[in-house]
Amino acid sequence: MNITRENIDALNAVVKVDIAKEDYSGKVEKILTDYRKTANIPGFRKGHVPMGMVKKQYGKAVLVDEVNKLLQDALNKYLTEEKLDVLGNPLPKPQDNLDWDADKLSFEFELGLAPEFEVNLSPKKAIIDYNITAGDKMINDQVLNIQKQYGKLISADVVSKDSEITGVYKNDERDIENTVTLTLDKFKGKATEKKFVGAKVGDVITLKTKGLYADDHELMHALKLSHDDIHDLDIEVTFTITEINERELAELNQELFDKLFGEGVATSLEDVKAKIKEDAEKQFKQQSEQKLLNDVTEYLVENTKFDLPATFLQKWMQTAGEKELTEAEAQEEYAKSEKSLRYQLIEGKLITDNDIKVSMDDIKDHAKQMIKAQMAQFGQMNPSDKELEDIAARVLSNQDEARRISEQIISQKLLALYKEKANIKTKDITYEDFVKEVYGDK
């Protein structure tokens, strides 16, 4: 067997594999001999079928199968030994007139080669790492929400600004009839609130759906319609009030504190606020870290310049999936996935250049911490190490779950790398201001 490579350019190559008959004939003969021993052909006793008949019936299929195995093994070994970083898989060049009886068989494979490039982690303009804090307003609002949640409902005669109102939305033309409980703060604008304040049970209020809620999902829930149905919906609906309640706030006492956090964990309002702040900022940290990862990823993809073997990759995509794609479909698929492919290459280089590794111990420890946190949510605060080990073993027996955890650890290690080496500026900001700055004032 002989393997040679011709580099077409920096990103494309053709590998030629020459296979001589002696490379595969021994294996083919052995398989056919075994077939002869077990073949069931009418008119012949088992084991006494003429070899010529066995070869005629099975020879070509066995030969093709063995040559394909030989090719696959040879190619894999060649790519490993030559340390070729290829994209996709080698693509066999079509051969319409291949003579399988020849003493030498030649096959050619197209390769798409990974580009060489450098990664610059120091943009001129610093990337912001948001340190999101829970402000006094958020904490006080959360305390109020807790008091409402654990408070009592008291029936009321008329609607006030803070009432909880149950009623029926109706529109005969669109076949809308849905009972909901709402609060006036969900409506967009003060005009709707004014229509409700002072109303009584049995009153019917007419409302326009356009601009009724700030969030379309609220309108979906209120009218029990699909997302498509409420898009640009501009009709009149009636709301018939069936029940009015006021929420008596729960008293801020030790009994409530113990319900919220466990016995004796918080003994004052200051403790409660500190706990709310701590829990909120843990969640904010996850959000800010994801934002930083997204921003660094965007920067790297936009600013790390290299070419890809696009024509090869589009050709490979045509046959890589379960369903064969047309040339146009493959071009479209490539356009969608090019950005992701670029980042995979950049990420791979960062992992290699910075010797980032994930060990089985890393995966197991991460799984145990994840399980411990989940158990704590259900009140199991001190699971034994054996308990954690057993659950982690079950979780990691699922290869998809183990791979997902490994990817999470890689993301954490890359985040640490970015914070250490990239041009990053920390910015302290309240959650409300973070939402305004990053997502717009919605």
Image (tube, rainbow, N blue to C red):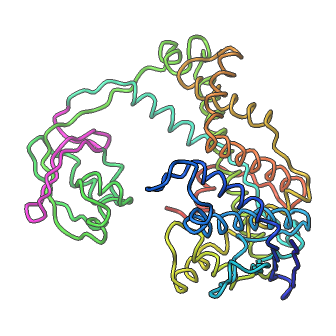
| Above or below, comparing residue 159 to residue 237 in the picture | above
Q: Is residue 113 magenta?
A: no
Residue 229 position in % (x across, y down): 26, 66
Residue 296 at least partly seen: no
* Residue 157 drawn in magenta: yes
Camera-side residue: 310 or 150?
310
Image quadrant in which you'd find residue 332: bottom right
Q: At 24% from the left edge and 64% from the top edge, which residue is drawn? A: 209
State which quarter of the image contains the N terminus: bottom right
Could one spot residue 397 in this view of the protein?
yes
Counting from the top left corner in percent of width and height, residue 176 is at 14, 57
Q: Relative to 56, say whether 435 is above or below.
A: above
For the point 91% across and 52% down, the residue is: 355
Point 82% across, 71% down: residue: 125
Q: Position of residue 133 (x, y in %)?
A: 67, 44
Foreground residue, 82 or 217? Answer: 82
Which residue is more in the foreground, 317 or 306? 317
Quarter of the image where one finds residue 434: bottom right
Task: Give the extent of the magenta segment.
Answer: 156-182
User: Residue at coordinates 89% horizontally, 53% vertically from top-left?
Assistant: 420
Q: Which of 203 and 100 is in front in this view?
A: 100
Q: Measured from the top left, where is residue 372 in percent x and y?
A: 65, 25
